[in-house]
Image: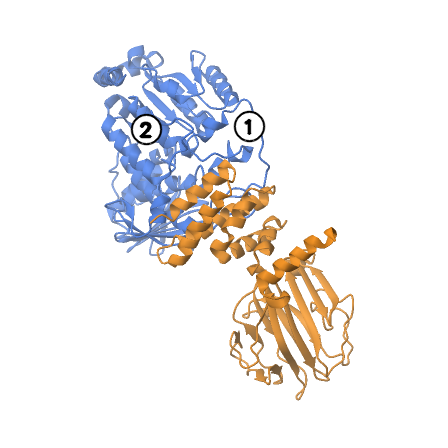
Chain colours: A orange, B blue
């Protein structure tokens, strides 16, 4: 019984934070229209919405991208390919140069010529092959989940892991963006073929404080900077956890936390900043002092408080 | 104490005329009454250069050395005696003991930046003249306090911007001031290479030979790690402002020497902190300054102007009729398609310096105003502090150059000052 208690506590915490276990996921596609998405001009728009489904049928039309950029996340959706359907999911890309800056997770019907594991559904197209080839049956709905977790990218189809990539270990991936838009590639096979998507949902890991803090001691500098920027974007809510991190063992994490605290306070101190944000930052810094941190940390926090004085 | 020193200075001044001839005849044996007795605070880095430069002057007697690191202190004393066997320097761990000595005229200060203002202010109060190191002070407000104290005490101050004394800066200023390039509307300054982070070393016990608490002095308390201390302290905002603060004075000097820009109104800096270590000063910083009738741009990369890509530091003046690009030793004038090193028609109007240390010592004797005097260098350093505040806050700031205050941004004003750590007695 006692063995299970921490697990129970975790579940309770997760439930409280997100309302329900899956509440961490938010729809990226409302099933009605394309708000939050954009199709770059220059090619005919290839995507249309009908009955809660995002469909690409126009051959070689424009790809579609989220207007927001995401770094670390779990993306899940369902897809259905026609007999010769050919699409893909673009991750961490700049829509101006999607394949140059990002990576395509392939979605492809198993038509001839037979495509190998490096180019089939679930592969990081041309970079990382599937190790566990998914069910490629066309005409039925499949579930795909793509997890971008710093240098680890995982693809699952129908609940089974197909691909796992360490972006730091693949030279060509190492040079790609760490955050970017999420896109779907227009169907680019024959006339009459199509790809469909529904239930497109995202869990944005960079909005989760514990996930963000864990990035502070990542071995790669770029992911530490990404984590710091995520902490700053979260704002005053991060102040108390950041002060706690400054009291931790990791020199790396302490250093990132120190800078993040400065940046959050600086943003809150801006003349045009929301008064509520400024007050929240002041309150959080005082609350952090109440936790009786060590003298150097307390001195730093007290100094930061001075920045918020009117 | 003050009285005694001023008395000594007046004596030096009165004897100035005879000293000139005396020096010609008996250079190596300046009479004791005409010698300037110098003490050096901070003996590493530029401190060693100060000791060498001043001890080489015939009218200088190096009487005291001070360092919070006893290893450095002993080494500097040994080096001095090797160079000048007649020298008998007393050594000190606390500069305040030097200031108590009534027989010392000049104090040089080559401490880390966060000590600059305190050492100078305390020395002024004790009736000493000061040869300081750049940047002038850790904070903008300290610079103001230094100038106020200097004005009240009548001390002589020179900032160690020794490039100022060279012929090139004088010639550049003459060419710019001659108007031959027309009105200068834009000046670009740059210094390549930013601050690194220096890894993530664990804190450790300071060596027994280092008084870490005194080294920190007015700065916030921090656990010791060697990266924070000798040689790399300047890459921490707790003590300095990185490569930018290190080199601003050297290259902004030629801008201020040539154009005396006034009426600074806005400062807008951008950049990044390093991600590869505990140090936090700019990995790169670009800053735009709007002076009255003059835009100044600082960049970490050379600007896209001819020849700049081969210069690690430089200033580029853009006039209506031509441009001038220079660094410490070189200059290129471009008028139309012509590229020139000099314009012989521009007359030599600025008196040349006898050398930066000599110029200071002469001012000490004459009670005159040295070339890198405090009001001048304070004006020159001021935009640097504002750029660092803008960099840290990630926003443009507006400056009232009459009141010397940031307009409408209390946090920016807050960053221009720092309350000294109170467990070290730093007030006289």
- Give the residue pinned by disc 2: B121
**Quarter of the rendering containing residue A161:** bottom right
Left or right: A294 as drawn, with respect to A21: left
- What residue is rendered at 24% in x and 24% in y? B367
> Which residue is pictured at 29% across the width and 41% down the height?
B379
Report helix, strand or loop for mark 2: helix
The kind of secondary structure element at disc 1 is loop
Q: Which mark is residue A100?
A: none
User: Which residue shows up at 30% across the image and 45% down it?
Assistant: B343
Task: Give how far across and how far down residue A114 sits, in percent.
Answer: 78, 77
Q: Residues within 10 Å of mark 1 (few under 14, many from 20)?
A: some
Gap between marks 1 and 2 measured at Cα: 28 Å
Label 1 vs 2, first from the N-terminus = 2
The answer to whether B34 is drawn above or below residue B261 in the figure is: above
Please give the chain letter of the residue carrying mark 2: B
Residue B361 lies, in percent from the top left, at 31, 23
Residue labelled with disc 1: B206
Say if A25 sits above or below B24 in the image.
Answer: below
Looking at the image, can residue A123 be seen? Answer: no
Viewer-nearest of discs 1 and 2: 1
The number of numbered badges drawn on the structure is 2
In this rendering, is residue A168 above or below B227? below
Residue situated in front as seen by the camera: A94 or B251? A94
| Percent coordinates x, y for residue A38 in the rendering | 52, 76
């Amino acid at each position: 019984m006692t063995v299970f208690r921490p697990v129970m506590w975790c579940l309770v915490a997760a439930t409280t934070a997100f309302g329900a276990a899956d509440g961490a996921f938010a729809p990226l596609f409302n099933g009605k229209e394309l708000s939050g998405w954009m199709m770059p001009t220059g090619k005919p728009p290839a995507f249309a919405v009908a009955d809660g489904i995002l469909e690409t049928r126009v051959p070689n039309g424009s790809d579609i991208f989220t207007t927001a950029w995401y770094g670390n996340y779990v993306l899940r959706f369902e897809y259905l390919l026609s007999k010769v359907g050919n699409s893909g999911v673009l991750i961490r890309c700049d829509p101006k140069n999607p394949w140059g800056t990002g990576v395509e997770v392939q979605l492809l019907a198993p038509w001839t010529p037979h495509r190998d594991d490096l180019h089939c559904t679930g592969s990081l197209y041309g970079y990382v092959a599937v190790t566990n080839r998914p069910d490629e049956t066309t005409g039925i709905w499949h579930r795909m989940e793509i997890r971008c977790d710093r240098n680890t990218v995982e693809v699952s189809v129908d609940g089974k892991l197909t691909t796992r990539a360490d972006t730091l270990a693949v030279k060509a991936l190492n040079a790609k963006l760490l955050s970017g838009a999420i896109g779907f590639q227009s169907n680019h096979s024959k006339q009459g073929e199509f790809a469909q998507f529904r239930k497109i949902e995202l869990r944005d890991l960079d909005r989760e404080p514990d996930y963000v803090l864990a990035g502070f001691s990542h071995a790669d500098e770029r992911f530490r900077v990404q984590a710091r920027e995520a902490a700053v974007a979260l704002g005053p809510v991060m102040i108390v956890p950041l002060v706690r991190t400054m009291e931790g063992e990791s020199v790396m994490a302490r250093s990132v936390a120190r800078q993040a605290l400065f940046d959050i306070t600086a943003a809150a101190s801006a003349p045009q900043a929301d008064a509520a944000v400024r007050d929240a930052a002041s309150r959080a810094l005082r609350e952090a002092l109440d936790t009786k941190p060590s003298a150097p940390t307390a001195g730093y926090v007290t100094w930061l408080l001075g920045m918020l004085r009117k | 104490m003050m009285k005694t020193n001023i008395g000594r200075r007046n004596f030096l001044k009165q004897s100035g005329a005879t000293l000139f001839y005396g020096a010609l005849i008996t250079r190596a044996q300046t009479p004791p009454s005409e010698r300037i007795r110098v003490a050096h605070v901070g003996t590493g880095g530029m401190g060693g250069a100060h000791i060498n430069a001043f001890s080489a002057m015939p009218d200088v007697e190096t009487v005291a050395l001070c360092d919070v690191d006893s290893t450095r202190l002993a080494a500097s004393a040994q080096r001095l005696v090797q160079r000048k066997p007649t020298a008998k320097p007393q050594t000190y761990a606390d500069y305040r003991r030097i200031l108590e000595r009534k027989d010392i005229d000049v104090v040089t200060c080559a401490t880390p930046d966060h000590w600059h203002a305190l050492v100078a202010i305390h020395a002024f109060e004790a009736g000493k003249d000061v040869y300081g190191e750049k940047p002038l002070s850790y904070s903008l407000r300290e610079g103001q306090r230094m100038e106020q104290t200097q004005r009240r005490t009548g001390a002589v101050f020179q900032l160690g911007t020794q490039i100022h004394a060279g012929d090139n800066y004088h010639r550049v200023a003459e060419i710019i001031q001659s108007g031959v390039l027309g009105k200068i509307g834009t000046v670009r300054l740059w210094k390549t290479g930013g601050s690194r982070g220096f890894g993530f070393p664990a804190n450790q016990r300071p060596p027994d030979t280092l008084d870490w608490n005194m080294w920190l002095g007015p700065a916030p308390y921090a656990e010791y790690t060697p990266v924070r201390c000798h040689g790399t302290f300047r890459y921490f905002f707790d003590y300095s402002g990185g490569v930018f603060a290190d080199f601003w004075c050297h290259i902004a000097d030629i801008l201020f020497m040539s154009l005396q820009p006034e009426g600074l109104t806005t400062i807008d800096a951008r950049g990044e902190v390093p991600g590869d270590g505990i140090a936090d000063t700019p990995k790169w910083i670009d800053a735009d300054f709007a002076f009255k009738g003059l835009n100044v741009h600082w960049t970490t990369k050379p600007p896209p102007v001819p020849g700049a890509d081969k210069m690690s530091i430089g200033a580029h003046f853009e006039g209506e009729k031509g441009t001038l690009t220079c660094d410490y030793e070189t200059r290129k004038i471009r008028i139309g398609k012509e590229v020139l090193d000099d314009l012989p028609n521009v007359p030599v109007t600025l008196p040349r310096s006898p050398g930066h240390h000599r110029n200071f010592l002469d001012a000490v004797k004459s009670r005159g105003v040295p070339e890198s005097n405090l009001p001048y260098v304070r004006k020159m350093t001021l935009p640097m502090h504002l750029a660092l505040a803008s960099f840290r806050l990630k926003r443009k700031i507006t400056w009232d150059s009459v009141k010397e205050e940031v307009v409408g941004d209390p946090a920016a004003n807050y960053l221009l000052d720092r309350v000294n750590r109170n467990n070290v007695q730093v007030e006289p």
